[in-house]
Image (cartoon, rainbow, N blue to C red):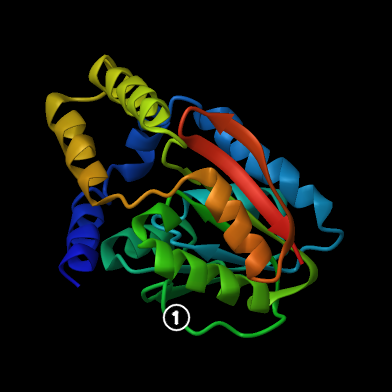
Amino acid sequence: METLQEIQNQFNAVSEKYDWQRQFLIPCFNDFYKTALTLSEEVSIVKNILDVGAGTGLMSAFFHEKYPEAKITLVDISSAMLKKAEERFEGNENINFLNADFATVDLPENHYDLVVSGLAIHHLPDELKQQLFIKIAKTLKSGGWFINADQVLGGTDLAEKIYTENWKNHVAQNPNLTEEEKHSAFERIKVDIMAPLKPQLEWLENAGLQNANCYYQYYNFVVFAANK
């Protein structure tokens, strides 16, 4: 519970500048989100989208632009982050917000055409990741897709060392971030609970989804997906 509260506090604290910072904190920002959007084209009709760990609504904003008529539900544990999302989509009746722990929130069965997530699920312990994947499988309609743009742990100690050093060097050398913002980013990763990619693909299959696969990777930044 302390870790969950710490995560909530960390993201409440950076909610004001989070979107602006993210383009500098993610070395592969454009490809990262573009891949997730392109994958969604595998779904023939997109009417209902769930954004898991939606934060300020950045991922939802991309999907709203691509599917302006779709209904999108944003769920996040950080009230401050979700408030920013509400401001972003103010007046849009197709956008709904749910301030809740996405790891334990109840989801309707066979409801969503797309379930998406951006840099959120790696905050969950592995057991909760697996439980969430099961809930996602149940909440997807037949033919629906789950698309996760996230960070993963290196498959070996050496890979993880290289992943971490690459990202830290990128942040440390970035002239667009203040020293305080860099320090805050380095503090936030202390509450990460990343898992390697391979077992997560297996967990998706075990949850009842199929064709689990990684479609993009830049060091520890990956986009993987599966369909129902």
Name the outermost residue toward the right.
Answer: 44
Q: Is residue 115 visible?
A: no
Disc 1: CA contacts within 10 A as few (<14), some (14-19) or many (>=20): few
What residue is shown at x 60% (from left), y 29% (from top)? 31
x, y (%) of residue 116?
Answer: 59, 58
Rendered image quadrant of residue 44: bottom right
What residue is shown at x 46% (from left), y 64% (from top)? 129
80 on left or right of 95: left
Question: At label 1, which amino acid type do we have?
Answer: Val
- The image quadrant where one finds the C terminus is bottom right
- The image quadrant where one finds the N terminus is bottom left
Total marks shown come to 1
Rendered image quadrant of residue 175: top left
173 on left or right of 146: left
12 on left or right of 115: left
Q: Secondary structure at mark 1?
A: loop
x, y (%) of residue 81?
Answer: 32, 59
What residue is shown at x 48% (from left), y 45% (from top)? 150
- Judge by depth and name the residue closer to the eye, 150 or 11: 150
Rendered image quadrant of residue 23: top left
- Judge whether 108 appears above or below 16 on screen: below
- Judge by depth and name the residue closer to the eye, 75 or 19: 75
x, y (%) of residue 19?
Answer: 38, 42
Q: Which residue is mark 1?
A: 105
Q: Is residue 116 visible?
A: yes
x, y (%) of residue 4?
Answer: 24, 66
